[in-house]
Amino acid sequence: MLTIGELASYAGVTVRAVRHYHAKGLLPEPERDHSGYRRYDAGAVIELIRIRTLAEAGVPLARVRELLQSGEEEFAAAVADIDRRLRAEIRERQRHRERIARLASGDSLALPPEVVEYLDRLRALGVDERIVRAERDGWIPLAAHSPGRVAEWMARKREQIDDPRLVGFYLTLSQALDRDDDDPRLVELADKLAVYITRMADERGEHYVDDTDIESPLVKLMDTLAVDTVPPARRLIELLKQRGWTGWTKLERVAPRPAAPPRRPAP
């Protein structure tokens, strides 16, 4: 005959757990002996181990009570069902572990491999990391919105990045990141970019310049991400509009607008 402490020790639980299972009606309480102590037999050890095993497997205590009162076949079927559920949970947790492991790889967490390759190419060309980050942040919602078109868009991007003129644009923009809106380098950059876009549209068609075909709210989101990460983009958008192109994520040809006259200082 065992004391409650010995029972708990043999079953691998705490005395508090034994008392909790008593209170829940899972483990019958034995009568007290003449000294006032409860004494347990070997059957209580087996029953307590069964309770502990089911509880640790995530079976609700109400369900544990039901299983303990069931016949052998019903109990075996229930245990098999619990085993299948645990296996499914293990597979799901493994997928979670794989996703967490991908955090260390940065861009690949939320982007297709071809986009990651493109971003790495920009880095290899010497493009400022802030511009690469802006590109990445734009591609994340775009790839989530239209995953079936990513391969098509990236093929075009790879073709464009082979053009030294576009590479020059990225590098010039990298140098202008920390400059004020009135820096003449931004005007020079807007001139080069407008010429490049216009030539590309004339040679390939305007659909080649912009064929993203995405809704306006997503366009605004991507533009906001770009401007927040690369502040000169806001000024470049204004300058491009003066040169016949509007937008950032979604480019559209417009009538060129005259430049606004410079502001005069207050007297």
Image (cartoon, grey):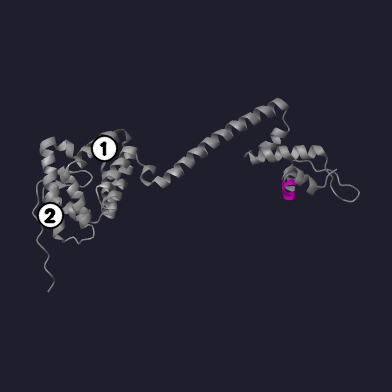
Specify the segment rendered in magenta.
Answer: 13-18
Q: Is residue 50 left or right of residue 149?
A: right
Which residue is identified by label 1? 154
Residue 35 visible here? yes
- Amino acid of disc 2: Glu
Residue sitting at x 29%, y 52%: 129
- From this viewpoint, which residue is outermost toward the top? 73
Which residue is identified by label 2? 188
Q: Is residue 132 left or right of residue 32?
A: left
Q: CA distance from mark 2 to mark 1?
A: 28 Å
Residue 189: percent from the left, percent from the top?
15, 53
- From this viewpoint, which residue is outermost toward the bottom? 267
Residue 221: percent from the left, percent from the top?
29, 47
Residue 142: percent from the left, percent from the top?
30, 41
Question: What is the quadrant of residue 112 in the picture?
Answer: top left
Q: Categorize mark 1 by other alpha carbons within 10 Å: few (<14), some (14-19), many (20+).
A: some
Residue 83: percent from the left, percent from the top?
61, 32
Q: Quadrant of the C terminus?
A: bottom left
- Amino acid of disc 1: Met
- From this viewpoint, which residue is outermost toward the right? 34
Residue sitting at x 23%, y 45%: 249
